[in-house]
Image: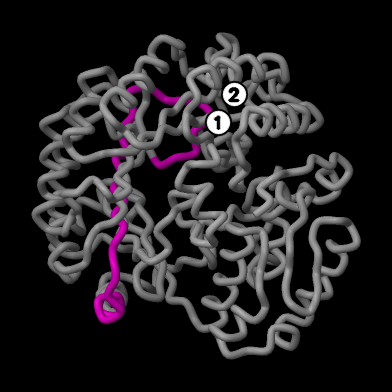
Amino acid sequence: MDQSIKFDLDLINRYNKSGPRYTSYPTALELHEGFGDLEYRQQIAKSNAAGGPLSLYFHIPFCDTVCFYCACNKIITKNRAHAVPYLDSLVSEIAMQGDLFDKNRLVNQLHWGGGTPTFLNFEQMKRLMDATRQHFSLRDDDQGEYSIEVDPRETNDQTIAQLRQLGFNRISLGLQDFDPAVQKAVNRLQSKEQTFAVLEAARKEGFRSTNVDLIYGLPLQTEQTFASTLDQVLEYSPDRFSIFNYAHMPSKFKTQRQINEADMPTPALRLEILQMVGKKLTDAGYVYIGMDHFAKPDDELAIAQREGKLYRNFQGYSTHSDCDLVGMGVTSIGRVGDAYLQNYKELDEYNQAIAEGKLPVFRGVALDEDDKLRRAVITYLICHFELSFKTIETEFNINFAEYFAPELENLAVMQNDGLLRLDQNGIQVEAAGRLLIRNICMVFDKYLALKQQQFSRVI
């Protein structure tokens, strides 16, 4: 398939409005507190009846220092002792959840996120992985996708060797920007030596995939300074890049209030940076996966996209569409059966539920048939940039043109603008439409009208 992109400034300016990132459909805004422990258990029973492999996500919320741009659920502390009671609760949750899932369901995907997972010491990480192996069926053949997010400032050669020993085979390095002025403005001081030492150690230990996270749109960034950061990382040739557009929402995320808004790049400058990023990475041989993600052509994500097997979940793009996702830890989100669900966001509430022997689920949403239909349409589009009407009609027993008549009218406008091609067989997203794939997906989102202002801009 064609995995190229075309940067059309006029189109981007016209379509650059707020919208979801579609790590789920319906989005997390539709989760409600009428869904709790009982409803989750019912969905687990449905999931076990369907069978299939599992994906596990663990949220480690602790960070040593605060990065001003951060919108994650985190706990800032230098006191490592704070991890001890949390780990006790997390291990208890693993046991509770593991007892509810069939033991013959292999864990094909596992991810530790945060926060900073390497805030834990090796004994704590080993305890967490041992508990997971005790209560779930982890793979022993290194063929699963077992990944972890690391902060190079909290990681060294020994840590990387220990992570590999625990079974991790994919690693994502947080970086954001090397420019000293930008680093100071966002309170994340991180050297090239720290960063690349971790990347090289991961390769030495046999990690099969390396990803680097960058953010554009941070204070004091220019096209030239961000190009310099990108060039320095390209010299080490990671397998994947995640290059996110910074969403400045200080009313929602308190730490962002420490950023000087006068230092923020203009919308025009952001677009110049984005255009530079797309050209530099594609010139270097990377392909655009979608939604800020680039990968080498032989990377699993790029191969899965070409083979029509790519999927999207709360961790981003994934090759494991057949897995139900079990989220564990404070604020974690899962997808089990026909539902999305989230654990308590506050640590006290999470610990209290665990202490009472309850699953710490405080909200969720069960999908109806229309939700599942629209989720399938959005997933095909956001992962593969194309959609076959016949595929959807066969799977859901509908007439696409009749069911989505208003949506097709809206897509006709996008066709006239050159974002996509539309015919009686389906939708093909053009190179100019791939950067705006969120806009195309938004056409099929029935919940969006009332919630659009709560999302970040698409570019």
User: In the picture, which quadrant includes the N terminus?
Assistant: bottom right
Left or right of 65, for residue 390: right
Residue 273 in view here: yes
Q: Which residues are magenta?
A: 45-73
Which residue is labeled 1 in the image? 256
Residue 248 in view here: no
As rendered, which of 457 and 256 lies closer to the eye?
Answer: 457
Residue 203: % across, % down: 34, 25
Left or right of 30, for residue 44: left
Residue located 69% across and 24% down the image: 264
Residue located 84% across and 42% down the image: 8
The part of the image, by quadrant, that contains residue 147 is: top left
Which residue is labeled 2 in the image? 259
Residue 57 lies in the magenta stretch: yes
- Please tell me whether mark 1 sits on a helix, a strand or a loop: helix
As rendered, which of 51 and 404 lies closer to the eye?
Answer: 51
**Mark 1 in CB contact with mark 2 (< 8 angstroms):** yes
Q: From the viewer's perspective, is residue 396 above or below residue 321?
A: below
The part of the image, by quadrant, that contains residue 150 is: top left
User: In the picture, which quadrant includes the C terminus?
Assistant: top right
Q: From the viewer's perspective, is residue 296 above or below residue 25?
A: above
As rendered, which of 129 and 331 lies closer to the eye?
Answer: 129
- Please tell me whether mark 2 sits on a helix, a strand or a loop: loop
